[in-house]
Amino acid sequence: MEENAYAIALRQFDKAVRYIDLKPGMADYLRVPKRELIVNFPVTMDDGSVRVFTGYRVHHNTALGPTKGGIRYHPSVTLDEVRALAMWMTWKCAVVGIPYGGAKGGVVCDPKALSLRELEKMTRRYATEISVLMSPQGDIPAPDLGTGEREMAWIMDTYSMHRGYSVPAVVTGKPLAIGGSLGRSEATGRGVAITTLEALKRKNIPVDKARVVVQGFGKVGAPAAYLIEERGAKVIAVSDANGGVYNPNGIKIRELLAYAKTCGSVVGYPYAEPITNAELLELECDVLMPCALEKQITAANAPRVRAAIIAEGANGPLTPEADEILVGKGVFIIPDILCNAGGVTVSYFEWVQDLQSFFWSEDEINERLRQIMVRSFNHIARLAYEKEVDMRTAAQILGIQRVVEAVMIRGIYP
Ligand code: GLU
């Protein structure tokens, strides 16, 4: 049977802790989530029937601050997947040095199969169910796969209705009009582009010679693609859940974006050849950006991957076996907990702005994001060199060390 995401997250953790001097029992403590909430709740569907949905919210660790992490709507959501994603959020926040612990939530559903009204009811009821955990000081959700600004607005409104006053800081990734932040919608993709530019420098590949392949054309992949294109790179292939398009001479990303908006998919874009998702991952290129789901590159296809750099826009797109094969081939991997940390970093800026009711300019946000991403990238690259480990292990070491330091300074209660 295929290994689940939590087992993978634990293997990555176990590999990294070998390089850290830990007090006995500390690793056992960090391997498990602090708390897990499972909710089963009813929603009245448009046809009058009642349907029961299952949702989760997992807090992995709170040593560095309130928990932070997105909410995923997908039919394949499981408790173990949410646990893995929560654990990765802990290391991710620590890696970029923002004062949060890790969390994640999810509802088992296919949001595309629900009407707008059903989706709103489900979201508001799920928000109510997890409100025992949610607060600006305790746990701050955000978008993830299958959710976006619209859902965040409903969650903010639901929480606020129960309180009797507006609480914008309870959730990030909101629309601008209700306390969202400039730059948040493209922040994850911007972080992917920034770390990719750093990796290109290290590999001595000039950006205007770089050929980039992007899997996933949503909230992460689309901005990553047009931002790297703006810097002079050529995006030669792009895919979404329905399939992909390939043009060795380069695809005009803004044009493709307009096409995908009208047609609902990149498939059929007239200025490129059709290509499957599986073929796309194996294209010869300088940068491969997996920005879709977990476990896209495994032991089965990793030997055929022909990228110099892999920028993990998604969470967990490589299995540990694929990781080993690719590191062995000399591929430079920008690990997810660094590469896609731009989203949660600007979520942090959004939260700070909401708490202060004082909003920053887009330039200020983008510049602060750039500084954090570049600094974190260099820190991890230095650590990888010093400890003679790959970038993922170095990132894990950095994240785990920062959490352990906080735990030790705070002390174990009571
Ligand atoms: N879901 C995103 C992630 O995996 C963003 C989380 C957030 O902004 O809190 O990093």
Image: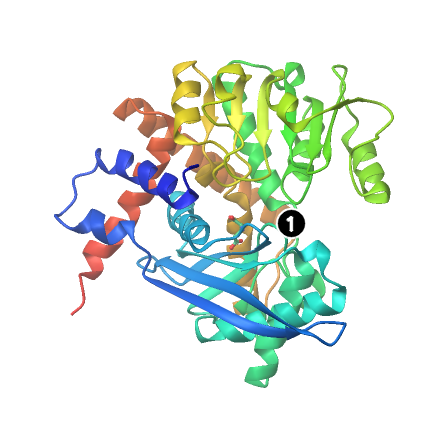
Q: Is residue 352 visible?
A: no
Q: Which residue is disc 1 drawn over?
A: 183
- Residue extending furthest bottom? 164
Describe residue 18's horizontal placement relative to residue 291 as left or right. Answer: left
- How many residues crowd mark 1 within 10 Å: few (<14), some (14–19), many (20+)? many
Q: Secondary structure at mark 1?
A: loop
Q: Quadrant of residue 269?
A: top right
Query: Is 263 left or right of 205, judged from the image as shown?
Result: right
x, y percentage for residue 34? 32, 61
**Residue at image location 72% in from the left, 65% down from the top:** 177
What amino acid is labelled 1 in the image?
Answer: Gly
Residue visible at 59% across and 36% down in the picture: 291
Q: Position of residue 13 (x, y in %)?
A: 30, 40
Vertical side of 364 occupied by 19: above or below = above
User: Where the N terminus falls, by quadrant?
Assistant: top left
Judge whether 169 appears above or below 105 on screen: below
**Residue 50 versus residue 85 in the image, above or below:** below
Is 35 located above or below residue 275 in the figure?
A: below
Q: Residue at x 52, y 61 (%)?
A: 141
Q: Which corner quadrant holds the C terminus?
A: bottom left
Inspect this view and state whether residue 174 appears.
yes
Q: x%, y% of residue 242?
A: 72, 36
Q: Position of residue 355 (x, y in %)?
A: 52, 68
